[in-house]
C-alpha cells in the first residue's frame, strides 16, 4: 500500500495526520482512590466443577433469578445469592456432532463443545437460548418454572443467530419476538451478518463496504417512535469494530463503529430484497490523550432514560496498537448519533488510479426519501408505507454508501475516563440517587485482571472511587450485568461468576472515611454512627454526604490513636510501618521536634513506612505518620501511626526476654511469615496483633495486613539483599516507569542511589537477615492528573504496588512486593 502524504490532494488528507490531530485533546488518567484486594466474605462466587466459560447472562428480576449460560450448561441462580443454585440444565453436544466437528479440523475439547451464547426473554414464561453446538449452532426455547429449567425441544437452526466459533465475539438482542443478531453465518467465519430473524427475515448485504472483517460488540434497542412528531420508527443500534475502508493506511487499520437499522425495515422490493434498507454506520470517535491509532470499542452499555432522547451510550475502548496501556470510556448521546444518521453527509467511493478506491464526502444531491431513513409521516404521505415502497434510487444509494462522512463525537468532547494499567473490558452504569437529590451515573468497569472499578463524575471531575478484586486469581471479566433494584453487579469469566454489591458502606469505619470516599451510595449516619447505604434509608436524625466537595467539617474529629513503643537499638536500621490511607494520599512523617522527615542518607520514606538508617541515641523520640490527601484545594490529614522510639531501658524486661527466646528458636522465622522476628542484636516491640492500631480503618484488610508486619528492625544484610533484588527486577521490567504527577516524598534524589547507599553498608556489619517487609514506593497523586506534558500516573494498582515519581526517577521499575526473604 502506498504511504500517506505521497502526491495526494488535500482532500485525501492522510489519515495519520487526522488521527494525530484528534489525539491532541487534554485528558486525565485516573487512579482508583482505594484498592480492595480479594475478600471472599463480601463477594459470592458461583462455579461448578468441570464447567467453564460462564459468559452469558440474563437477569430475570421478575423470577428472582440470574440465568447463566456456560459451556454445555445453563443455570438459574438466586439473584440475591448466586451461590445458591436453583436449577441447572446440561446441554451437551452429541458424540456424532463432536466427531463431525473434529473431522472439520476443529479441536475436540475446546471448539467442539456447546457454548451457550444466547439467552433472551421471549415472554414471561419462555426464553430463547442458542449454543455453538460443536460448530453447528442451534437454538431452542426454554422455560424456568417450579424450580426447573426445561428446554422445549423445538430445536431451530442457529446459523446467523449464534456464532459457530465460541471465540468470535458476537451480539444479539430480542425485541418483541424478533431476534436481532450480529455474527458470522458460515463455518469459516468469513461471512458477517446482521440479521433479524422474524417472519420477514432481513439481513445485511454481503459487501465489504457494509461489514469489513467486523468484531461485533453490542446491540441496543431505542424506542424512538415514542412521542415522535415525525412518525419515526424504533431503532436497533449495533456497536462493532472493523477494518476501515475510508483511510489509506500502510496496514490494516481498525476503527470503531456504530450502525443502526429501523425496526420496521422489511427490505426493498427489487433492490435490497430482504436486506436492510436502513443500515447506516458511522465512525465512533474516542480520542486518547496521546497520539495513537483510533482505539477499539470493547463494550457498550445503554443508560436508559424514560425519555429516550436523554439515553446515553457508555463505551469502553482499548488501544489497537498494543503499544499503549491506556483504556478509555467515552459516552455518546442517542441524540448525537441520531443527528449524524438523520442529517449528516454520506461518504462515497471514488475510483482513483487503477482499482484503487477512495472514500470521500458525497456532496451531490441526495435522492428522496433520504437514504437510510426509516419510514416517516412524510414518506407515508406520498404513499410509502413500508420500506418495500422505497424507490430504487434511494435504495441503490444506501446499498453503495452505508457510511456516514462524520464521526460520532463523545458527549463530553473527549473521554470521560482514561486509565492506564490493566485494560478495561466491560461496563455497566447505574443511576444513583444521592442525598443531595441528584442522580449520578456510576460506572462499574471490569478489567482484564479481574477487578471492577467504580467511577463517577462530579462536576467535571472524574473520580474512581475504588477498585475491587473479584477473583483470587486474575480472570479477565467477560460479562458484566447490573441489577439496579437488587443492588448487585454480576461479573462473568471463564472461571466463574462473581456477585458484588454495588457498595459496601460498612467498610468505611469513620465519618471522615465515609465522607472522603465520596461514594453516592453511602452516607455517614450521625445517629447510628455508621457509614450506611443511602437507598431506602431515612436516616433518623441526619446524615453526612459531600460528593463534590468531600467536606468532612460535619464529622467529629477521630479519637487520637495510641502510641506504639519501639526499642531503639543503636547502629541498626529501624522500620516503622505505615501506609497511606488511599492511593491518592501521601504519607508525611514527622519527628518529635516537628521536623518533616524526607528520604535522604538518614531516612528512607517508602510506601510501607519509614526506614531509619543506622539509628543513634539522638533518634529517640516520637515519629508520627500522617496520610495527607488533597481534595478541591483542601488538605485532609489523618494520623495513621505514632511510634515512640526509645532506648532499651524504657521497656519491660519480660518483653525483651520473650523476643530473645523467639529469635533464639528461629533465626530465620521470617520466611513465609507476615510477622517479623528479630535477632539477638535487635529487639522490637510489635503492636499486639489483636489490638487494632487504627480503629478507624480496621476493616481495611490491606492495611491490617500491612500493620501485622509489625515493627521490624531491618539488618543491613537484609537491606543489601533487597537492593540486589530490586536491581535484578529493574533490569527486567520497564512498565512502572512514569513521569511526574505532583508533589513527591521521593525528592529529586533517585532511590537507586539510596539503595546503593544501603548496599555500601552491607559489608560493614552483618546481622542475620530478619524482616519480612513489603517494600513499596509511595504512590501519591491527585485523582486525575492532567496530561499536558504527556505525563502519567502509572497506575499499577490492583493490589500491586504502584508509584509515581519525578520525571527523572525514571527507573525504579523493579520495586515490587517483597513478601518474605524466600523470594530473594
Ligand atoms: C448463599 O447460598 C449458599 C448456598 O445455598 C448458602 O450456603 C449461604 O449461606 C447463602 N448465603 C447467604 C448470605 O444467604
Ligand atoms: C411465549 O412464547 C412462546 C414461544 O413463542 C409461546 O409458545 C407461548 O405461547 C408464549 N406464552 C405466552 C404466555 O405468551
Ligand atoms: C473456555 O474455558 C477454557 C478453560 O479455561 C478456556 O481455555 C477457553 O479459552 C474458554 N473458551 C472461550 C471461548 O472463552
Ligand atoms: C553509624 O553511625 C555511627 C555514629 O552514630 C558511625 O560511627 C558509624 O560509622 C555509622 N555506621 C555506618 C555503617 O555508617
Ligand atoms: C496533620 O495534623 C497534625 C495534627 O492534627 C499536624 O501536627 C500535622 O502537621 C498535620 N500534617 C500536615 C501535613 O498538615
Ligand atoms: C560477617 O559475615 C562473614 C561471612 O558472611 C563472617 O565471616 C563474619 O564472621 C561475619 N561478621 C560478623 C561480625 O558477624
Ligand atoms: C508542562 O510543562 C510546562 C513547561 O515545561 C509546565 O509549565 C507545566 O506546569 C507542565 N504541566 C504539567 C501538568 O506537568
Ligand atoms: C532531569 O534530567 C535532566 C538532564 O538529565 C535535567 O536537565 C533536568 O533538570 C532534570 N529534571 C529534574 C526535575 O530533576
Image (spheres, rainbow, N blue to C red):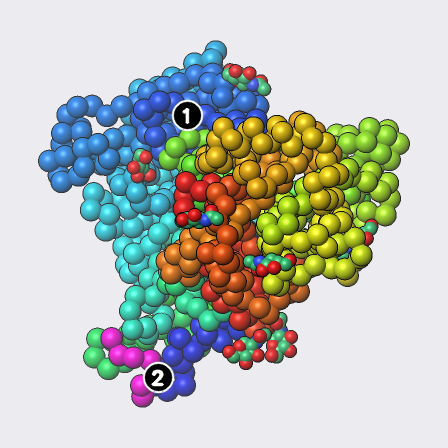
Provide the major secondary structure of the magenta segment. loop
Give the left or right position of residue 14, taking residue 723 as reference: left
On whether ligand 7 comes within 8 Å of the CB at mark 2, the answer is no
On screen, 788 above or below 425? below
Q: Which residue is more in the foreground, 162 or 104?
A: 104
- Residue 685 drawn at (x, y percent): 66, 36
On whether ligand 3 comes within 8 Å of the CB at mark 1, the answer is: no
Point 40% across, 18% down: residue: 88
What is the residue that sits farthest to the right in this orientation? 541
Q: Quadrant of residue 806?
A: bottom right
State whether residue 99 appears in this view: yes
In percent of width and height, residue 406 lies at: 48, 69
Does the image show residue 416? Answer: no
Is label 1 in a helix, a strand or a loop?
A: loop
Which of the 4 image quadrants contains residue 126? top left
Choose between 537 and 757: the one closer to the eye.
757
* Position in image of residue 464 (x %, y %): 62, 50
Residue 103 is a magenta residue: no
- The magenta span reads 1-7
**Could you say which disc has been placed on residue 814 in the image?**
none
Question: Would residue 494 appear left or right of 522 to someone viewing this image?
Answer: left
Q: Which of marks 1 and 2 is nearer the N terminus?
A: 2
| Residue at 49%, 21% in the rendered image | 83
Element assignment for label 2: loop
Label 2 CA crowd tier, 10 Å (few <14, some 14–19, many 20+): some
Give the camera-side residue of 48 and 126. 48
Instruction: From the top left corner, tell me how far across and down residue 118 is, in percent.
Output: 38, 34
Q: Residues within 10 Å of mark 1 (few under 14, many from 20)?
A: some
Instruction: Kindly identify which residue carries mark 2.
Output: 5
For label 1, the residue is: 47
Amino acid at each position: 500500500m502506498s504511504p500517506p502524504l505521497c502526491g495526494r490532494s488535500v482532500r485525501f488528507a492522510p489519515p495519520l495526520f487526522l488521527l494525530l490531530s484528534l489525539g491532541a485533546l487534554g485528558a486525565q488518567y485516573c487512579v482508583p482512590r482505594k484498592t480492595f484486594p480479594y475478600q471472599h466474605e463480601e463477594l459470592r462466587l458461583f462455579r461448578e466443577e468441570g464447567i467453564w466459560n460462564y459468559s452469558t447472562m440474563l437477569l430475570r428480576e421478575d423470577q428472582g433469578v440470574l440465568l447463566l449460560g456456560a459451556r454445555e450448561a445453563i443455570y438459574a441462580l438466586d439473584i440475591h445469592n448466586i451461590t445458591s443454585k436453583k436449577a441447572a440444565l446440561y446441554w451437551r453436544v452429541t458424540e456424532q456432532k463432536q466427531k463431525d466437528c473434529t473431522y472439520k479440523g476443529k479441536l475436540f475439547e475446546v471448539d467442539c463443545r456447546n457454548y451457550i451464547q444466547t439467552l433472551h426473554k421471549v415472554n414471561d414464561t419462555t426464553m430463547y437460548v442458542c449454543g455453538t453446538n460443536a460448530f453447528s449452532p442451534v437454538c431452542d426455547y426454554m422455560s424456568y418454572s417450579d424450580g426447573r429449567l426445561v428446554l422445549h425441544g423445538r430445536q431451530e437452526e442457529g446459523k446467523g443467530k449464534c456464532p459457530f466459533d465460541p471465540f468470535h465475539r458476537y451480539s444479539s438482542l430480542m425485541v418483541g419476538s424478533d431476534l436481532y443478531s450480529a455474527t458470522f453465518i458460515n463455518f469459516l467465519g468469513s461471512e458477517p451478518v446482521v440479521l433479524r430473524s422474524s417472519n420477514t427475515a432481513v439481513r445485511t448485504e454481503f459487501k465489504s463496504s457494509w461489514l469489513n472483517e467486523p468484531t461485533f460488540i453490542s446491540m441496543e434497542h431505542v424506542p424512538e417512535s415514542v412521542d415522535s412528531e415525525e412518525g419515526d420508527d424504533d431503532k436497533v443500534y449495533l456497536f462493532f469494530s472493523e477494518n476501515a475502508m475510508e483511510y489509506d493506511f500502510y496496514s490494516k487499520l481498525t476503527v470503531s463503529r456504530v450502525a443502526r437499522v429501523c425496526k420496521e425495515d422489511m427490505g426493498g422490493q427489487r433492490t435490497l430484497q430482504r436486506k436492510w434498507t436502513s443500515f447506516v454506520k458511522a465512525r465512533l470517535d474516542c480520542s486518547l490523550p496521546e497520539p495513537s491509532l483510533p482505539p477499539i470499542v470493547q463494550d457498550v452499555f445503554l443508560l436508559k432514560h424514560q425519555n429516550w432522547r436523554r439515553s446515553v451510550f457508555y463505551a469502553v475502548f482499548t488501544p489497537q496498537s498494543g503499544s499503549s496501556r491506556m483504556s478509555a470510556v467515552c459516552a455518546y448521546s442517542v441524540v448525537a448519533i441520531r443527528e449524524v444518521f438523520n442529517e449528516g453527509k454520506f461518504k462515497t467511493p471514488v475510483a482513483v488510479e487503477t482499482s484503487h478506491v477512495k472514500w470521500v464526502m458525497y456532496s451531490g444531491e441526495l435522492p428522496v426519501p433520504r437514504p437510510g431513513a426509516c419510514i416517516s409521516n412524510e414518506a407515508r404521505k406520498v404513499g410509502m408505507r413500508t420500506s418495500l415502497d422505497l424507490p430504487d434510487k434511494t435504495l441503490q444509494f444506501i446499498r453503495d454508501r452505508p457510511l456516514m462522512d462524520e464521526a460520532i463525537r463523545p458527549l463530553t468532547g473527549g473521554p470521560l475516563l482514561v486509565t492506564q494499567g490493566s485494560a478495561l473490558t466491560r461496563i455497566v452504569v447505574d443511576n444513583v440517587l444521592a442525598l443531595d437529590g441528584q442522580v449520578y451515573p456510576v460506572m462499574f468497569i471490569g478489567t482484564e485482571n479481574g477487578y471492577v472499578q467504580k467511577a463517577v463524575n462530579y462536576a467535571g471531575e472524574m473520580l474512581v472511587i475504588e477498585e475491587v478484586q473479584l477473583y483470587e486469581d486474575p480472570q479477565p471479566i467477560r460479562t458484566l450485568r447490573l441489577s439496579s433494584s437488587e443492588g448487585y453487579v454480576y461479573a462473568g469469566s471463564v472461571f466463574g461468576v462473581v456477585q458484588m454489591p454495588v457498595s459496601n458502606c460498612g467498610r468505611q469505619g469513620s465519618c471522615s472515611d465515609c465522607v472522603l470516599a465520596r461514594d453516592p451510595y453511602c452516607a455517614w449516619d450521625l445517629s447510628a454512627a455508621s457509614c450506611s447505604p443511602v437507598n431506602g434509608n431515612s436516616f433518623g436524625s441526619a446524615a453526612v454526604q459531600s460528593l463534590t466537595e468531600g467536606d468532612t467539617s460535619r464529622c467529629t474529629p477521630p479519637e487520637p490513636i495510641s502510641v506504639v513503643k519501639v526499642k531503639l537499638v543503636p547502629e541498626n536500621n529501624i522500620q516503622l510501618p505505615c501506609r497511606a490511607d488511599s492511593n491518592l494520599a501521601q504519607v508525611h512523617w514527622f519527628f518529635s521536634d516537628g521536623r518533616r522527615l524526607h528520604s535522604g542518607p538518614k531516612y528512607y520514606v517508602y510506601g510501607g513506612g519509614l526506614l531509619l538508617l543506622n539509628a543513634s541515641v539522638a533518634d529517640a523520640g516520637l515519629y508520627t505518620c500522617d496520610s495527607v490527601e488533597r481534595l478541591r484545594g483542601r488538605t485532609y490529614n489523618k494520623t495513621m501511626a505514632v511510634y515512640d522510639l526509645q532506648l532499651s531501658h524504657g521497656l519491660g524486661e519480660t518483653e525483651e526476654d520473650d523476643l530473645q527466646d523467639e529469635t533464639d528458636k528461629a533465626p530465620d522465622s521470617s520466611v513465609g511469615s507476615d510477622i517479623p522476628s528479630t535477632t539477638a542484636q535487635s529487639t522490637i516491640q510489635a503492636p499486639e496483633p489483636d489490638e487494632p492500631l487504627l480503629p478507624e480503618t480496621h476493616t481495611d484488610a490491606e492495611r491490617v495486613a500491612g500493620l501485622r508486619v509489625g515493627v521490624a528492625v531491618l539488618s543491613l544484610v537484609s537491606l543489601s539483599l533487597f537492593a540486589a533484588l530490586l536491581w535484578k527486577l529493574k533490569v527486567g521490567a520497564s512498565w512502572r516507569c512514569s513521569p511526574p504527577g505532583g508533589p513527591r516524598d521521593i525528592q529529586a534524589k533517585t532511590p537507586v542511589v539510596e539503595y546503593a547507599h544501603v548496599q555500601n553498608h552491607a559489608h560493614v556489619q552483618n546481622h542475620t537477615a530478619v524482616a519480612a517487609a513489603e517494600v513499596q514506593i509511595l504512590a501519591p497523586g491527585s485523582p486525575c492528573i492532567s496530561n499536558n506534558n504527556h505525563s502519567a500516573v502509572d497506575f499499577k494498582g490492583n493490589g500491586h504496588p504502584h508509584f509515581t515519581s519525578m520525571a527523572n526517577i525514571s527507573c525504579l521499575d523493579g520495586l515490587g512486593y517483597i513478601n518474605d526473604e524466600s523470594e530473594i
